[in-house]
Image (cartoon, helix red, strand yellow):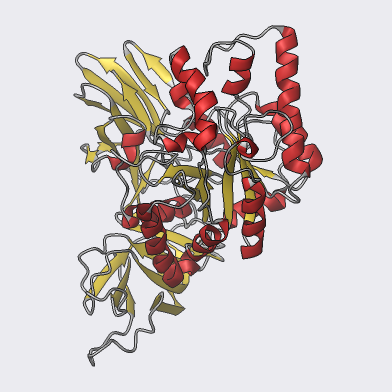
């Protein structure tokens, strides 16, 4: 059922001058050719977090990694390839310390850029002189990364781009990502070049656990790498890897979202806008609640050090994960992913983690009560708060015990934030309530499909549907929407505006006309047992 649901969500409808597209979850890099072993995909589903490292020689300029070459002048291109390698010396790159920090933050693997689109190789390759050995560094930096990552106990991941601007330049082909033309002989050379590089990566560095393929052609990379390393888990190129966004709805198949700490993948020293530690923690929570994982990116400085802003955020995530890792590792989605600002993960079907993300103003020592509509208690139900014993609070003798009560409206849970994390008592990050021995309030959640958007007499007609509509208690639905400023800006966007509620037709469909001008994100929402369940995000372009 879920696979059928996902296929439907990936369709888009164009009507009149309005186009409604799933750009927000679009990932055209997934392929039907998937030789990932089930146990490796199961490992990813159990893994909440990985570290992505984008690092190359153009970090010296603080510009976008590789992409500045597209449309660049001949002078820029020539100096990029001839001058930048002469000054690239990441002498302070310490992969051991990076791996230790990653492990503290809850990361189980690290994916390192072996080669980005520019074609600069971070390993001792025999395929080209455009590599780390022909810089002042003169060492195989990739080997240092692999050895350190294994030593710390994390799995080793490689990012590899089959697109190669250096190859294009050497063959006098204009640098482009969309209209690259080669004759048959050049294409053969290109494929052989890619194959030889993959063979080096898969034979010279021992067991490689994860591969992220960015760019085309992917098939040669997949065939070569799976042949040499059958246990390799290929993410982009085989499974869904939405970039810089979170899917709007729960997904049952393995997936990950790759997201930057700021706006840039590589090092950007100025004009950068970092997400706060709390925002990054919330992205991790959202990914786990929706059945996926987060691949969080950092970009080292040209000397190899992590910028302090990135280290700070990883340490904040480390503190939160140290307290709450039980709700992140080896968990699955609950019957619904969230209720308002409370997100859910679960274990074994009867242990529920209610993750309270709206905790910034929750003062230490204060009791709060929450109503959870998607769970019901049993005779064995127990409630606790992760990280604290709920028996003692520092310097006070207050009652900080956890309580619960089943009511007609839902399961009422009352807890005190009783653990001191910061000196000033103002820890702003989510609090996790663990509920043992509870049952879902309903066996099957509705599957809400966000439909098309159609221009109609000055309005936009938004459509939605409940795919598995068979519950008479599900009677109303609506649409949420907000202005769309661009893919990177989506994670910085404001709150959604809810529309009025509308009735659901006997076939499970619903629709509403709204006056919207410009580009908008929108999603369908329906209510089941007083719980709001969301469909996938879509993009409305006008």
Say which of 186 and 290 sits in front. 186
Q: Is residue 71 visible?
A: no
Question: Is residue 336 rendered to the left or right of residue 541?
Answer: right
Say which of 424 and 257 sits in front. 424
Give the residue at x 61% y 9%: 181
Residue 20 in the image: state x and y as whole percent: 37, 22
Question: Is residue 42 rendered to the left or right of residue 342?
Answer: right
Picture quadrant where residue 160 is located: top right
Residue 507 in the image: state x and y as whole percent: 42, 32
Question: Is residue 69 rendered to the left or right of residue 308?
Answer: right
Location of the C terminus (image quadrant): top left
Say which of 378 and 200 sits in front. 200
Rendered view: 448 above or below 519: below
Residue 291 in the image: state x and y as whole percent: 51, 51
Give the residue at x 69% y 6%: 183
Give the residue at x 44% y 39%: 265
């Amino acid at each position: 059922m879920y696979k059928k649901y996902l296929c439907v969500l990936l369709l888009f409808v164009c009507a009149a001058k309005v186009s409604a597209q799933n750009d927000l979850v679009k990932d055209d890099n997934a392929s039907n050719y998937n030789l990932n072993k089930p146990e490796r995909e199961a490992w990813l589903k159990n893994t909440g977090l990985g570290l992505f490292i984008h690092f190359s020689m153009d970090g010296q300029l603080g510009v976008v990694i590789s992409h500045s070459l597209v449309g660049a002048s001949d002078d820029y291109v020539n100096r990029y390839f001839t001058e930048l390698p002469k000054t690239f010396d990441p002498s302070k790159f310490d992969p051991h310390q990076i791996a230790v920090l990653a492990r503290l933050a809850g990361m189980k693997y690290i994916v390192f850029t072996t080669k980005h689109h520019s074609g600069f190789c971070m390993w001792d390759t025999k395929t080209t002189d455009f590599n780390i050995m022909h810089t002042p560094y003169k060492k195989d930096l990739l080997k240092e990364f692999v050895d350190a990552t294994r030593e710390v106990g994390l799995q080793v991941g490689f990012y590899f781009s089959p697109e190669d601007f250096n190859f294009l330049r050497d063959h006098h082909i204009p640098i482009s990502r969309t209209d690259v033309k080669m004759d048959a002989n050049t294409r053969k050379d290109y494929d052989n070049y890619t194959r030889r590089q993959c063979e080096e990566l898969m034979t010279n560095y021992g067991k490689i656990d994860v591969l992220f393929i960015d760019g085309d052609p992917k098939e040669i990379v997949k065939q070569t790498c799976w042949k040499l390393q059958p246990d390799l888990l290929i993410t982009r190129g085989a499974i869904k890897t939405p970039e810089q966004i979170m899917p709007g709805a729960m997904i049952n198949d393995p997936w990950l979202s790759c997201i930057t700490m700021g706006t840039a993948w590589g090092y950007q020293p100025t004009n950068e806008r970092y997400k706060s530690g709390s925002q990054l923690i919330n992205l991790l929570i959202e990914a786990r609640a929706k059945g996926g994982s987060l691949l969080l990116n950092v970009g080292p400085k040209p000397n190899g050090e992590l910028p302090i802003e990135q280290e700070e955020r990883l340490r904040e995530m480390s503190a939160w994960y140290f307290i709450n890792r039980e709700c992140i590792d080896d968990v699955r989605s609950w019957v619904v992913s969230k209720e308002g600002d409370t997100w859910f993960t679960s274990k074994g079907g009867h242990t529920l983690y209610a993750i309270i993300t709206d905790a910034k103003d929750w003062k230490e020592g204060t009791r709060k009560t929450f109503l959870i509509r998607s769970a019901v208690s049993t005779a064995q139900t127990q409630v606790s708060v992760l990280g604290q014993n709920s028996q003692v609070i520092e310097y006070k003798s207050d009652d900080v015990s956890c309580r619960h009560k089943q009511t007609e409206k839902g399961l009422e849970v009352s807890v005190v934030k009783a653990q001191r994390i910061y000196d000033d008592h103002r820890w702003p990050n989510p609090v996790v309530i663990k509920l043992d021995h509870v049952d879902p309030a309903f066996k099957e959640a509705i599957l809400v499909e966000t439909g098309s958007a159609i221009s109609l007499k000055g309005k936009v007609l938004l459509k939605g549907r409940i795919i598995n509509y068979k519950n008479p208690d599900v009677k109303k639905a609506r649409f949420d929407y907000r202005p769309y400023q661009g893919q990177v800006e989506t994670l910085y966007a404001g709150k959604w505006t809810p529309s009025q509620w509308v009735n659901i037709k006997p076939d499970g469909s619903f629709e509403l006309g709204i006056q919207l001008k410009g580009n908008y994100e929108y999603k369908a929402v329906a209510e089941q047992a007083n719980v709001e369940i969301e469909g996938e995000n879509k993009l409305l372009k006008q």
